[in-house]
Image (cartoon, rainbow, N blue to C red):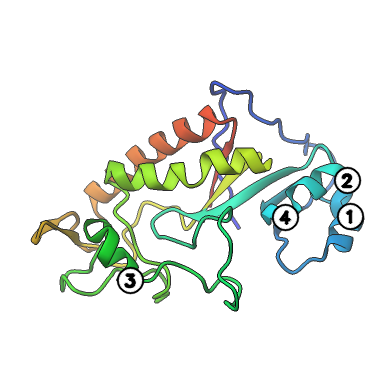
Amino acid sequence: LTLIVAGDAGSIALRPWANTSIGIHRFLAFDSALTAHQVNSTAADYDYVWGASAKYVQLWKAHNPGLIASVYIPMTRDFRVCYTEPQPEGSEPFNWKRNLSWWQEHHPSWIVYKADRKTPAYQYDDTCCVPLDISNPLVQQFQFNNCTGPAAAVGYDAVAIDNYGFTNGFGGAGVWRDGNWVQLYSASRSDEKYVSDVVTWTKTAKAALHAKGLLMIPN
């Protein structure tokens, strides 16, 4: 796991990191497999929980006030209904996302397709997580409005942005807007426009997160 920490001051003070210059320090990738008892008994062992569950955020902090907890979101795809919304009864964990049909009905112009103009540019062949056009300000607004405010209210210190990068590795090419095809990228891994859009998205995300007092942790 490679972490790049963007943490300069925003309008709200950001949580300071532990001094890791001495000794060996540990972080936890995800806590979804832990019980509340395990969180209680191991909280002092960690400086950082990358993908912290909302139900455990306050528990981590109660037993380790210096710990930093971040909520997990991917950069370019819809991951799930926001964690503050109830999980549908009977559904399996991590299997309650908005599907392609939902996006085609509600926000068809936000879906990024491959060069064939019909196949969504899914990451890792994960057909549950619809790829979104991060160059679209409405997509950015959707991402940040569904994360920054609720995350800060729950008590998170940071947002962990997964699958962050500057290569168009999954062949995203364009979107359909009002029935017209809009070419965004060449669909090759190396694309200057894609790099530019990631840089712009990063600046926007950083401002939105820091305004809420949240660190930004791209991976």
Mark earlier in primary sequence (2, 4): 4
Mark earlier in primary sequence (1, 4): 1
Q: Which residue is mark 2?
A: 63
Q: Which residue is mark 3?
A: 100
Q: Is residue 37 visible?
A: yes
Neighbour tally class for label 4: few under 14, some 14-19, many 20 plus, Cα within 10 Å: few
Which x, y percent locates residue 61?
80, 43
Q: CA distance from mark 4 to mark 3?
A: 28 Å
Which x, y percent locates residue 10?
54, 23
Question: Which residue, as the protein is rendered here, is positioned at the far front?
Answer: 89
Towards the viewer: 192 or 199? 199
Q: Amino acid at mark 1?
A: Asn
Q: Amino acid at mark 2?
A: His
Q: CA distance from mark 1 to mark 2?
A: 6 Å
Mark earlier in primary sequence (4, 3): 4
Q: Are marks 3 and 1 in contact (CB under 8 Å)?
A: no
